Image (cartoon, grey):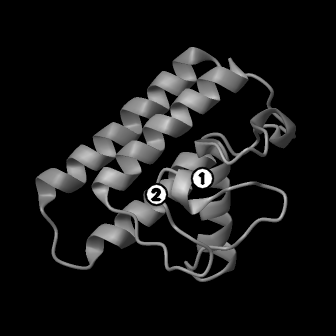
Amino acid sequence: MLAVSKYDQAHIDAVRERIAADVAAFESAAPGDGLEPVFFNALVLALDRYFVHRLRGAEGKDGNPANEVRVLCASLVENGGVMLADKQIKLAPESSVLGIAPGEPIAVDAAGVARLAEGFFAEIERRYT
């Protein structure tokens, strides 16, 4: 599979339920300090993976939540968890979901991943269904 221009609503709904279940499982487990950003940074990577082959052109470059997930993942994987600036995507911290500026460490929490996922799913539904 090289590129995806459409996702079935059933796939989007299943991923939405999975991410919500993962957040709920974390919150009910009440793990120790320091684990929250590790878990939720990994959950951002997982969220992206479910839609990894989405056409970049359909996603746009306007700083939407799908762009934010893309840049977050690149930053987590390629830049040691420090937010990168992407010259092709107009992602401004003040208008992004998480508000992380280039050069800042990425430490997503439960509330942040919930907001990010909500915006991401809305963008995927709008652009890929």
Left or right of 88 on screen, residue 23: left
Where's residue 31, x and y in %? 16, 68
Q: CA distance from mark 2 to mark 1?
A: 10 Å
Q: Is residue 48 visible?
A: yes
For image coordinates 68% across by 66% down, the residue present is: 74
Q: Which residue is mark 2?
A: 98
Three-letter amino acid code at disc 2?
A: Leu
Left or right of 32 on screen, residue 92: right
* Quarter in which the C terminus is drawn: top right
Residue 11 is tagged as none
Q: Say above or below: 94 vs 5.
A: below
Three-letter amino acid code at disc 1?
A: Val
For image coordinates 62% across by 75% down, the residue present is: 102
Name the quadrant containing residue 77.
bottom right
Q: Nearer the viewer, mark 2 or mark 1?
A: 2
Q: Say above or below: 63 vs 106.
A: above
